[in-house]
Image (spheres, rainbow, N blue to C red):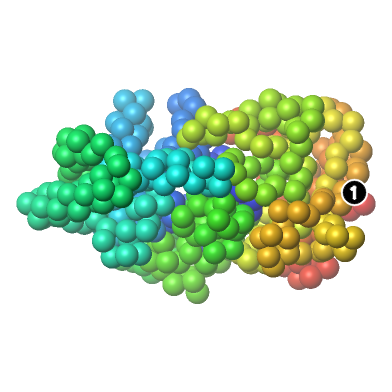
Amino acid sequence: MPVLVVVGAQWGDEGKGKVTDLLCEQADLVVRYQGGNNAGHTVENLRGKFALHLVPSGIFNPNIISIIGNGVVIDPTVLRAEIDDLESRNVNTRGLKIAGKAHLIMPWHIMLDHVQEARLGVGKIGTTGRGIGPCYADKAARQGVRIQDIIDPVGFRQKVMATMEAKAEVMAKAYDQDVSSLKEECERYIEAAESLRPYIDDTALLIWNSLREDKRVLLEGAQGTMLDLDHGTYPYVTSSNPVAGYASVGSGIGPIEFSEVWGITKAYTTRVGEGPFPTELSDDTGVCLREVGNEFGTTTGRPRRCGWLDLVALRYAVRINGFTGLCITKLDVLDTLDTIKVCTQYKYKGELLDELPPAQAIFTEVEPVYEELPGWKSDITGTRSVQDLPQEAIDYLNFIVRHVRVPISLISVGPKREEHIKVPHPDYSQRASGGHAGRQQ
């Protein structure tokens, strides 16, 4: 810090919630900069276990300002329910601020999301059906509804209803949909949106002024690099940009303010939804990773596809985001394995590839090239320093660092908040030569 960006380095679900919750101890402001309630962070602390979908992880610290940035799309009924749940469990939400420029998900977005996904058939994307894509589409088409519109209640209602009528006509005629419930749903959404009025602020100005006062800011994204709208496995991606570059756009501060960018990656790889996944395992090992790692979506409950760590994709994420540090999560999930495979290259028609292929058609056909490392066959959840890890675990971490050339900053060794290892940053000149994770091999 003063400005640290936290980015998912894989296909999302990397454990960003736990990492950002830990990093909040050093922050004055925590800002969610993109995505919607199609994402979720699971946070465990002294108050219990929480599934956050829109509210930033900093909400559990009463001294932190938690900001939902302008790059986020907000379902007002979901946010209202999330705030109510937090308050019912004695979490103070007075520090929550919402960017007035953030766009609102409305009932027609959700209906359109389901209709469009159903029509894709076998070519479906795997959307969560929460209206995220259609809301971002309306934003780009300059037809969106923003939360700052509720400052004028009469004008807000008129805008919502007029837009609803236009959307209902299209869905009824083009998609043969029953739109009779849309008006009633819109009334519910208007009521929920208006209840959020006390939280609206000029958050970009708030962040700017805080930085002038030497406050520390944590910017957190949803999903992951490989789901980025521009840089992910299109079209099997999310509808926004999780990469570090968008943290500037989605929060309203210039990129020159960024001090560090940390990438979050599991010690293996998971993915939810459709799309290519070179290291996916459909055998007993894949089932083991899913069960031991509790790999089920925070938002949807869908089982995640599991596979070995993909260093080709991770190197890509390093390049796209400019990571200055890595956070390795769920290392403990590998505790029981005799051997661990790591994908270091792809093979396509006999040719070895060190980088992601430029064409999606090629990426769907690549085969992973693995190197095999010995497992450590011991419980590491009680470990609190790199030096106390089994040598095989240290070797595994050093193997990752040598291939991606970014130092490790934090290692999660269990699901509980205290089950982690903070790694002192090496000199950044080590990035060029491979960095280190602790004791060298």
* Depth order, front residue of 194/166: 166
Residue 242 in view (yes/no) = yes
Q: Position of residue 75 (x, y in %)?
A: 32, 43
Q: Position of residue 373 (x, y in %)?
A: 90, 43
Report the residue at 66% width, 60% height from top: 360
Q: Position of residue 2 (x, y in %)?
A: 50, 62
Q: Quadrant of the N terminus?
A: bottom right
Classify 66 as above or below 137. above
Pointer 1 residue? 371
Classify 218 as above or below 337. below
Counting other residues with Cα less than 10 Å from the Cα at mark 1, is it few (<14), some (14-19), or many (20 or more)?
Answer: few
* Depth order, front residue of 166/392: 166
The amino acid marked with disc number 1 is: Glu
Q: Is residue 126 left or right of residue 208?
A: right
Report the residue at 21% width, 56% height from top: 148
Q: Position of residue 408 (x, y in %)?
A: 72, 53
Residue 327 in view (yes/no) = no
Residue 33, quarter of picture: bottom left
Report the residue at 48% width, 64% height from top: 246
